[in-house]
Image: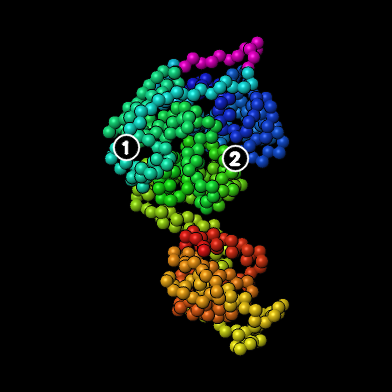
Amino acid sequence: MIRKDDILKMTEKGISVFRYYLPVDFKVGKNFLNPFYKDTKASCNIYYERKAGVFKMKDFGNEDYSGDCFELVGRLNGLSCKEPKEFVEIMEMINRDLHLGLSAHEEYHVIHSKVPQKSEVVSEEPKAKSVRPYTVVQKPFTAAELAFWGKSGIGENVLKAYRTVSLKKFSSENQERKPFSCMTSVDEPMFGYMGKQHIKVYRPCSQMRFLYAGDFGDNYCFGLEQLPAKGDLLFITGGEKDVMSLAAHGFHAICFNSETAFIPAAVIHRLSFRFKHIILLYDVDSTGLKSSAKREEELKEYGVKRLLLPLAGTKTEKDVSDYFMLGNSREDLIKLFLDYLETLYSETMSALKSCEVDFNNPPPIAQMIVSVNDVPLGTQGNLLCITGGEGTGKSNYVAALIAGAIRPTGTDVDALGVTLHENSRNKAVLFYDTEQSEVQLYKNISNLLRRCGREAMPEWFKAYCLTGMSRKERLLSIIQSLDKYHYQYGGVP
């Protein structure tokens, strides 16, 4: 079983654990700001307690963060060191996240480090981290291995893009520096996620599913290099297979070492400038639900949200790979995201609904007050303000542009000399009128529909009369509805 003393020995009495989970470059004995809340005064430090023989954290601003490395990891993951089962889970997290290689199925003979005496000097800087050497022998993917990945929609092109290989043999060292090797077989295939200076071995059918070797750096993030410079939607998932499954279905995704791994705020801060929506898409089992809720709270200042998959949460039905294996498509996940946006923007969309023009139900004709050739310039209940010359044709010009945007594919329309690209993919065309009455807008829509040869409004053409909204409400409504229809109709031309 994994023992506390083994972890302390392999992490320099806990200092390596603090360096991994604390996203700040601290020095032992020097005060720093606690990164886990809005700390305004540097009153937190890491020190060596000689009596216990371990490094501890002391936060004078919030005593909840004071304690040894195990208490910190428990605090970050909602676990208590006082509960035996939860303490075991804490040790397993540290073992997994720091790639210590300690196994719950093997016994290790570890000489416990002695408590330093008063005459001994404790270095303020930990020793260089240990890097496990490794060698691999690659081989071509077999038909059975490609079929395994294909169940999640992952093809050879995606495997190649994410530097995922099929391994014949993997050799490295255990924590006692004893060499070992693993060989692939028909019943136990072996794959490798290849990094520049590291490898994460994935053995989906073996008891020990993951092995680690090499230098992973400070923040392991799979899929980061494959992201575009800019994008609309980014998913953060729990594993490498989920990242590639999402990529195979046309989504951008990354993952850290595990769902329980701490997500560096600096990484999310940079990504928040590149992507409009960053969504946590973790497993829907108990661990995934707990972790995603915690990560959402930690990263809320960057607008990170979580999306829950409609799965049972069982071993074979809990992650996005399972979601696609069950027959769901890209469109199904987009629909799930749209439902999320509908909930997020529910108040705005409800307000907009009352403003949407229903072409099949014309609004009541308002009493005409001022008109020119039966074209109303002012109606009862509205203010009439003339600030320029008559008949400048602004509305007609806009109508001509819209008529060109919604014309049937393959037809021409007189757009007053302007050439418009055909909207052959039926992307959303949105018309927000902040000046004219609903009656005038209805007439303008009727004219532009006749102009482009349509008898009814296409489902993807939305027209809104926002005269009843304040400027602040108009701006919010336009921004959020643009965002929703962008995803619903594949863009706004």
Q: Nearer the viewer, mark 1 or mark 2?
A: 1
- Residue at x-position 52% and y-position 53%: 232
Residue 116 lies, in percent from the top left, at: 60, 14
Dot 2 corresponds to which residue? 266
Q: Is residue 358 visible?
A: no
- Residue at x-position 50% and y-position 31%: 216
Residue at the front extreme of this rendering: 417
Foreground: 489 or 196? 196
The answer to the question of whether label 1 and label 2 lie on touching residues, with beta carbons closer than 8 A, is no
Q: State the extent of the magenta-drawn residues as a range.
A: 110-122
Foreground: 110 or 205? 205
Residue 438 lies, in percent from the top left, at: 58, 77
Within-10-Å neighbours for mark 1: few <14, some 14–19, many 20+: some
**Quarter location, residue 117:** top right
Q: What kind of residue is marked 2?
A: Ala
- Residue at x-position 47% and y-position 45%: 253
**Quarter location, residue 464:** bottom right
Q: What kind of residue is marked 1?
A: Phe
Position above or below: 147 against 84: below
Dot 1 corresponds to which residue? 141
Relative placement, left or right, of 492 versus 211 is right
The first of marks 1 and 2 along the sequence is: 1
Foreground: 419 or 89? 419
Looking at the rendered image, the quarter that the N terminus falls into is top left
Please check the rendered image and state whether residue 276 is part of the magenta-colored stretch, yes or no: no
The residues bearing labels 1 and 2 have C-alpha atoms spaced at a distance of 37 Å
Within-10-Å neighbours for mark 2: few <14, some 14–19, many 20+: few
- Residue at x-position 59% and y-position 64%: 477
Mark 1, secondary structure of its residue: loop
Residue 426 lies, in percent from the top left, at: 45, 66
Position above or below: 192 against 128: below
